[in-house]
Amino acid sequence: MTGFPTAFHIGPLIFHTYGFGLAIAAYVAYLYARRRLTHAGFDAGPFAKYTVWLLISGLVGARAANIATNWRYYEGHPGRWIAVWQGGLASFGGIALALVVGLILQRRWWPGTRLAAFTDALVPALIAGWAIGRFLGPQFMLDGGGHLTHQWFGLHYHGQVGKRVPVPLIQGLEDGLLWLIVIALERTRLKKAVGVISATGMIVWGVVRATDERLLLGQESHSGSLGVQAAGLALALAGVVTLVMHWPKRDHDDRPDTTVRSPSSFA
């Protein structure tokens, strides 16, 4: 935003403000996730290296997706491929690769545990970290705003002309609200239904992210924008499948007893 530096120099080095914001969000999410795993009965010993692998795979996937959807910019310029400090990360690419790596390592380091229980412990922490990251990351980067707007809530962002829809703030509020929803669900009888927390997060986050991309950020002719929308809906669909698979079924013992009894049986 205007008035707030998007980068600062220490000697010859350039540090981007949004990078520090994302680092803070990642650290908070790590501490929160570790605590939740311990509370859920999982061994938190391997979680530090598990997190490192998720971060690396997420960065690689996000960069690869951005290159693939903006190939005209990167074609013929291999040096741009690794210039992550200049921006250019596609969140869904990072999620996709980190998800695959996370599933493999979960089976390796927590064998014999239920995957749905593991993700139920992690999802609220991931949502909380994502909310913090939207406030402290894209909010302070070049071209961080959405479409042009003349409404009172519009903000000025470095690299963009005119007032813009403050998409990072909107998404931070959306993710914060989603975190409150999943935490509230954990206080209901659904806390015993393994997988419901994960499914709820997938459905709501996927639909909201796709909607934001279409209405506030995306250009219909841009392959990256269309890819984000498709990935969001795919995530939501996967969440629906997960919810159907794990929704608590009524036990036979809870059904009304319709057995006809003789009068003596009521004695």
Image (cartoon, rainbow, N blue to C red):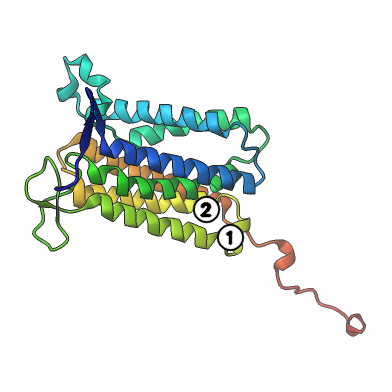
Q: Amino acid at mark 1?
A: Leu
Q: Which residue is mark 2?
A: 197
Point out the tag, 2 or 1, that comes first from the N-terminus. 1
Quadrant housing the C terminus = bottom right
| Image mark for residue 190 | 1
Please tell me which residue is depicted at 61% across the width and 27% down the height of the picture.
Answer: 108
* Residue 58 located left or right of residue 65: right
> Judging from the image, what secondary structure is the residue with disc 2 in?
helix
* Residue 157 located left or right of residue 266: left
Q: Judge whether 76 appears above or below 59 on screen.
A: above
Which of these two is toward me, 56 or 260? 56
> Judging from the image, what secondary structure is the residue with disc 1 in?
helix
Image location of residue 50, percent across then percent down: 53, 31
Q: Quadrant of residue 181?
A: bottom left
Contact, mark 2 vs mark 1 (Cβ under 8 Å): yes
Image location of residue 64, percent across then percent down: 31, 25
Q: Quadrant of residue 154?
A: bottom left
